[in-house]
Amino acid sequence: MTAALDVPVRHPPAPPPSFTHLARLTDDTGLLEHARHAVPRREHGYCTDDVARGLVVVCREPDPAPAVLRLAEVYLSFLTHAQDAGGAFHNRLSYDRRWTDEPALGDWWGRALWGLGTAVGRSSAPWIEQDALVAFELGAARRSPAPHAMAFAGLGAAEVLRRYPDHAGASDLLAAAAAAVGWPDSDPRWSWPRPHLAYASAAQAEVVILAGEAHRDVALRAAGLRMLSWLRDLQLVGDRLSVLPAAGWHRGTARPQYDQQPIEVAALADACATAAAVTGDNGWQQGVRQSIGWFLGDNDTGSVMWDRATGGGYDGLTPTGPNLNQGAESTLALISTLQHGRAGAGLRTR
């Protein structure tokens, strides 16, 4: 592995989240997936995965500006158009507005339910909340065989339960999501349900915590917290985050270091914020601070992972520094993480 910095980088306080680059990537159809530096690449079109993440972050804003509320309307319209009559979703739309795939229950289905559920649980606009609930309920009747997809869907179900605590469909989906993730191995050296860590793994631990809390299952909540604690410790070098690359890690193999993706950092920040809110233990906020620090330069190469001029997040951390392209996924990960940095933000507070 490439040598990492030994001394934590001193970085300024966290800036407020900016929606400038997100607006740059958004048109009246949806959210363009990729950019070359800060310029959107129309030839790559749109994907439900990113639009759903976009709906999550804009609906987390407690008092959205009109321009941010407009983004929520565009993203919700895209998701309801992507959904078929059976609750599945298309994922890829070309720039000429043609779907290039068939509706299915992949990770994008789970993320779509996460976005819709967040709109239900948090949007300040009644028309957004109501239409999102209709689409969520249609999708929530389905089940995916993929644990990651179920984890994302479960996060959406937990959001619905914020506003509608007795919503049976959301409660059932959250329980099913935790069951799909499974229980961690009893070996403390690998406290995870499977022998492979893939991308955004912290979301799986988070949904187990939320399911345990919602269903008053102390053992399940403790299992999720154990998973998250192990995962966070695994990705620390001293007090600095060194997250697993997008390719993941197989048990029993050498731990890879690059390329590190912002989505890993954002998922960890979300999960640590949830753990802090559920347990009342502010020690979990250290994980949030470390996640923010990763974007501000407290990472393995000492690289700032966003562009102050554009508001965009860089697409990945390589051995030689950041990939300077500023696509939707990385920009959303930046915004999501910085939302936790607001004084008294408490995104997961009940």
Image (tube, grey):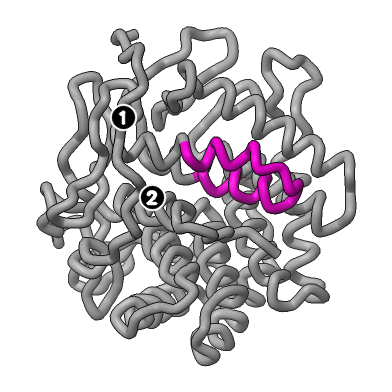
Q: Which residue is tagged 2?
A: 333
Q: 89 above or below 181?
A: below
**Counting other residues with Cα less than 10 Å from the Cα at mark 1, is it few (<14), some (14-19), or many (20 or more)?**
few
Task: Give the quadrant of residue 284.
Answer: top right
Q: 88 above or below 321?
A: below
Tell which circle, 1 or 2, labels the residue nearer the N-terminal end: 1
Read off the magenta span: 267-289
In magenta stretch: residue 128: no
Secondary structure at badge 1 equals loop
Query: Tag 1: residue type?
Result: Arg
Q: Residue at x 35, y 48 (%)?
A: 14
Q: Nearer the viewer, residue 23 or 142?
A: 23
Residue 104 in the image, given as x and y percentages of width and height: 52, 60
Q: Residue at x 24, y 36 (%)?
A: 304
Task: Give the quadrant of residue 160.
Answer: bottom right
Left or right side of 158 for 293: left
Query: Tag 2: residue type?
Result: Ala
Label 1 – label 2 distance at C-alpha:
21 Å
Residue 103 in the image, given as x and y percentages of width and height: 48, 64
- Quarter occupied by the N terminus: top left
Q: Residue furthest bottom?
A: 127
Secondary structure at badge 2 equals helix
Viewer can see residue 86:
no
In magenta stretch: residue 272: yes
Q: Which residue is tagged 1?
A: 10
**Counting other residues with Cα less than 10 Å from the Cα at mark 2, is it few (<14), some (14-19), or many (20 or more)?**
many
Q: Nearer the viewer, residue 230 or 149?
A: 230
Residue 93 in the image, given as x and y percentages of width and height: 30, 65
